[in-house]
Amino acid sequence: MNEKLIVKVESLKNMLVSHATGGAACDAMAYAALRQELIAIPRVSQKLPRLVHTCRTPSEFWGFIKSKFAHYSERREFLRQEFNPLLEMLELEAQSPSDATVSAAVRNVNSEYVREVWQKALDRRATDPEGAITAARTLLESVCKHILDEGAISHKDTEDLPKLYGLTAAQLNLSPSQHAEQVFKQILGSCQSVVEGLGALRNRLSDAHGKGKAPVRPASRHAELAVNLAGSMAVFLLETSEARKRASSPTN
């Protein structure tokens, strides 16, 4: 998905560079279609150069760029700098190989809400770190509730993430106390610590609570970590749930 977006953004940039430096003129219909498609994607729209938002046609762009810079080299450099933040964001997102794995697992879940929350976490991690951290925790909460509901395990909507995870882990035989091997105890204990850490991170850094005079604000790297951890844990839980269902099937 991100690779395709990068190509489209590069195409728009190259289209404008060519138009601004004596090359092929922009095709008005192609420019309008590509501009509209990119503006419709919230996280992309936020980082699109302002000139793309304000110049609705190639002729409007030409009027803007020719009055701003006299030389082709200045126009090329200006457009490069204007598009760089968006391209860097998309390239960073594309470097997260776990995205496709988590997306594939989430698509198999019979819950539109789980899919929406995961997409929200992906969309917000570069532009809205606080919102991404909130979505990361909500993803894990939703996956736990989904698994508990499928297993007819009673739980309250008001229960926090560590409690929901504890119930889910017990249901899937993932609690450290359910294993004798020390290595499994250690790994599953670490999983529990990750979940508790995500809950604490959300309470401290997300947009879920009010802020004081000097709030601690997360960077995009913190959101990237939270989303990746939540995604990995969600896949682990979902795949374990599916494996247990297959093992208990009468056909096996």
Image (tube, rainbow, N blue to C red):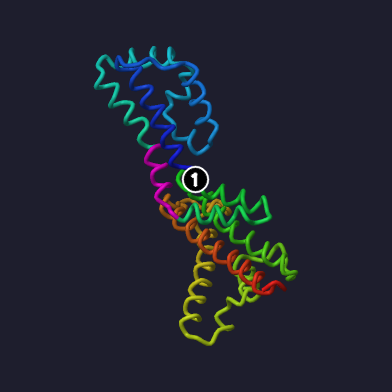
Is 40 within the magenta?
Answer: no
The residue where tag 1 is placed is: 128
Name the residue rendered at 64%, 56% in the picture.
109
- Please say whether residue 216 is visible from this viewpoint: no
Towards the viewer: 91 or 250: 250
Q: Position of residue 125 (x, y in %)?
A: 48, 48
Name the residue rendered at 37%, 32% in the picture.
83
Secondary structure character of the magenta stretch overall: helix
Q: Position of residue 38 (x, y in %)?
A: 50, 31
Name the outermost residue toward the front: 251
**SS at mark 1?**
loop
Towards the viewer: 60 or 2: 2
Position of 24 with respect to 226 (left or right) is: left
Q: Position of residue 73 (x, y in %)?
A: 24, 22
Count of numbered circles in the view? 1
Position of 208 with respect to 3 (left or right) is: right
- Please say whether residue 165 is visible from this viewpoint: yes
Towards the viewer: 195 or 96: 96
Q: Is residue 48 above or below residue 25?
A: below
Q: Position of residue 208 (x, y in %)?
A: 58, 53
Is 90 within the magenta?
Answer: yes
Name the residue rendered at 55%, 80% in the picture.
176
Look at the image and give the residue range highlighted in magenta: 86-97
Name the outermost residue toward the bottom: 180
Give residue 90's quadrant in the image. top left
Q: In which quadrant of the rendered image does the C terminus lie?
A: bottom right
* Number of residues whose C-alpha sits closer than 10 Å to that of mark 1, classed few (under 14), some (14–19) or many (20 or more): some
**Amino acid type shown at disc 1:** Asp
